Amino acid sequence: MNPIIGLDIVTLDRLRVQRHMRDILTVASDIPGEYWSEQHFLDERPGKFQLSQLALQDTRAVGYAVISERAPGCAHLHHLIIVRQHRGYGLGGALLHRATAVAKQAGHTRMSLKVATANTGARDFYRRHGFVEGEIAGTLIWCETKFCD
């Protein structure tokens, strides 16, 4: 089945976090060392419940992008994950595209994120989507993209 059929990307507000929590936690269950718990999704951060996005297929969560405001004009992508069986079909790119559009519409001019230096697949993904690698902080690399008009 084509995972793009029936896909909807919606704002991941507090109500949707609570409604889809079981699916949301399952999305990253195959990733070694994944530490995000229910509390991470429920924690308040500036703009989080307006900027974050949820990918739904029918009524099931198949991916998400958790974003908040890091500084005035700068959104920060904390977490972007697609469920294993839906990876490789462009859903991550679609989710990131929607997330950056929402951030831009909210008045942000750039987006930052941190990615593990060892995660070459994610680093390649973010570079393909316009992020530039910057400062290395331990095992993480800061990346940023600026939004164009």
Image (cartoon, rainbow, N blue to C red):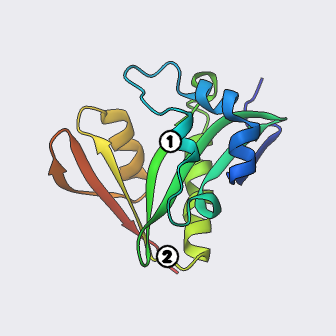
Q: Nearer the viewer, mark 2 or mark 1?
A: 1
Tell me the element at label 2: loop
Disc 1: which residue: 40
Q: Quadrant of the N terminus?
A: top right
Q: Position of residue 28 (x, y in %)?
A: 53, 27
Disc 2: which residue: 108
Tell me: residue 139, above or below residue 148: above
Q: Residues within 10 Å of mark 1 (few under 14, many from 20)?
A: few
Tell me the element at label 1: helix
Along the horizontal axis of the image, is 101 left or right of 75?
right
Instruction: Name which residue lies at 33% across and 43% down.
Output: 123
Instruction: Name which residue lies at 56% across and 66% down.
Output: 47
The image quarter containing residue 60 is top right
Instruction: Name which residue lies at 75% across and 29% down.
Output: 2
Disc 2 marks a residue whose amino acid type is His
State the CA–CA distance, disc 2 to disc 1. Answer: 23 Å
Tell me: residue 7, above or below residue 43: above
